[in-house]
Image: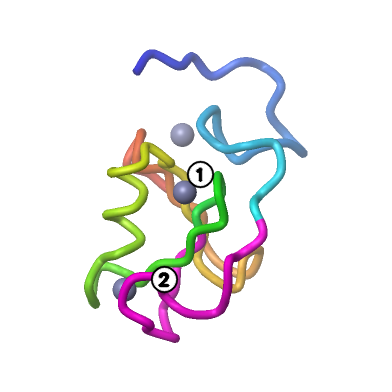
């Protein structure tokens, strides 16, 4: 993976790995285990998964599907994390 960050940041994606438009959540529970709290949204495809203090399904999805950018749900009210860079973006 050799994506360079370009100069067009600002109002757009959180980082070079994020899609221009954050995907709509597939639902309000983890798609794998059904958890309804501490959920993470995949910015790329809208997958909803649980955090790493639970089954870690959001992380498994991000790494497995190579969709590195996740948002704390509800999206826009919490952090955005990029697994490609291992940092908040
Ligand atoms: Zn990134
Ligand atoms: Zn889960
Ligand atoms: Zn995804």
Characterize the magenta stretch by its predominant secondary structure.
loop
* Image side of residue 41 versus residue 68, left or right: right
Q: Position of residue 33 (x, y in %)?
A: 31, 78
Going by the picture, which residue comes out furthest to the bottom?
36
Q: Earlier in the sequence, mark 1 or mark 2?
A: 2
Which numbered dot is residue 31? 2
Residue 2 in the image: above or below residue 53: above
Q: Secondary structure at mark 2?
A: loop
Which residue is pictured at 49% across the width and 59% down the height? 47
Q: Residues within 10 Å of mark 2 (few under 14, many from 20)?
A: some
Which residue is pictured at 73% across the width and 36% down the height? 12
Disc 1 to disc 2, C-alpha distance: 24 Å
Q: Which residue is mark 1?
A: 89
Specify the segment rendered in magenta: 24-41
Mark 1 lies within 8 Å of ligand 1 (Cβ measured): yes
* Image side of residue 4 versus residue 26, left or right: left
Was residue 18 drawn as part of the magenta stretch in this picture?
A: no
């Amino acid at each position: 993976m050799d994506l360079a960050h370009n100069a067009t940041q600002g109002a757009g994606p959180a980082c070079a790995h994020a899609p221009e438009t954050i995907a709509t959540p597939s639902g309000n529970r983890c798609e794998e285990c059904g958890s309804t709290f501490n959920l993470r949204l995949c910015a790329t495809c809208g997958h909803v998964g649980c955090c790493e203090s639970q089954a870690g399904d959001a992380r498994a999805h991000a790494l497995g599907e190579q969709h590195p950018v996740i948002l704390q749900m509800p999206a826009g009210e919490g952090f955005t994390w990029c697994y490609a860079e291992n940092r908040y973006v």
